[in-house]
Amino acid sequence: MKTIKQVSDLTGISIRMLHYYDKIGLLKPSSITEAGYRLYGDESLETLQQILFFKELDVPLKNMKEMLESPQYDKVQALHEQKELLSLKRDRLNELIALIERKLKGGSTMSFKEFDMSEYFNALETFKKEHADEVVKYYGSVEEFDKNLETMKSKELEIAKMAIKEFGSIEKYTEAMKNNLNKLPSIMEGFQTVKENADVYLAQTNQLMERLTSDLSKNPSSTDIQEIVKEMDGMVKDHSEIVKMDMGENYWGLMADLYLTKPAYTKVYDKKYGKGATKFIGEALKFYSENSN
């Protein structure tokens, strides 16, 4: 058993805050002595450890309490999820530190303001408050929506870069997201239609990819290769019409980056279509994105 002071010294959480956790029922001591001193055993300390992980992920205390009290709460599963989210947060912080270092060396980089996703996340919070019925209908619960939101926040810099690449700015990306939320029911109906025809779409995609990579000795910018990419673009536009979602002004530029920079893509597509296929696809998409408008 540890006293409240020992727990405070061990975790860095103030005694006052531990009292508050007790008051709201988030963390109860294992026992209280006749003199009124709180004592914490292994089970309480395990719960506190979970709280610390959630706290590092900026999960509100109310949400922590709901999750910890839920009959479906699985400590092991929670640890796996917390590990993933904390790893993403670590990567984000490392990128921000690298950005600062480049700025200190006089490098030409974007400012933090250009990576600010506050308006985007605020819009999602507003949607949650004003359309709780749709949140529950399409996400399962407010808690699940919050969980998805926290995951996005842990990937803030990554999403910001994607937004700028695909839409030109975070402002345009946020506006597109707001428009999508305003027509969420029709978008979800569109997704259902796409899902019901997934086998057909997958077959079409595979056929186009096989044609695109049938001869990797060709120039990715050649007319016949670009005609295939144009067909791919038409198919994506047809799907976006069904789903009624804004794909941004540089969708293919973003996709090109994924093929050209993500090792996971190389592993999958080189195995499926031959060595060098991933780079070939990326270069073909990049050329199309830069010359199709």
Image: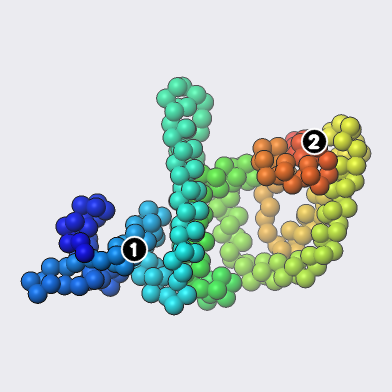
On the picture, is 42 further left or further right than 103? left
Q: What is the x, y in percent for residue 171? A: 54, 48
Disc 2: which residue:
276
Query: In the visual, does 84 lie left or right of 288?
Result: left
Mark 1 or mark 2: which is in front? 1
Compared with 161, 62 (above or below) is below
Residue at 88% of width from left, 47% of height from top? 210
Q: Position of residue 289 (x, y in %)?
A: 75, 39
**Image spot of residue 165 (x, y percent):** 62, 41
Q: Earlier in the sequence, mark 1 or mark 2?
A: 1
> What's the colour scheme?
rainbow
Q: Is residue 278 visible?
A: yes
Q: Which mark is residue 46?
A: 1
**Does residue 103 lie above or below 234 as drawn?**
above
* Quarter occupied by residue 190: bottom right
Horizontal and vertical percent position of residue 8:
21, 56
Q: Secondary structure at mark 1?
A: helix
Mark 2, residues whose alpha carbon is within 10 Å: few (<14), some, or many (≥20)? some
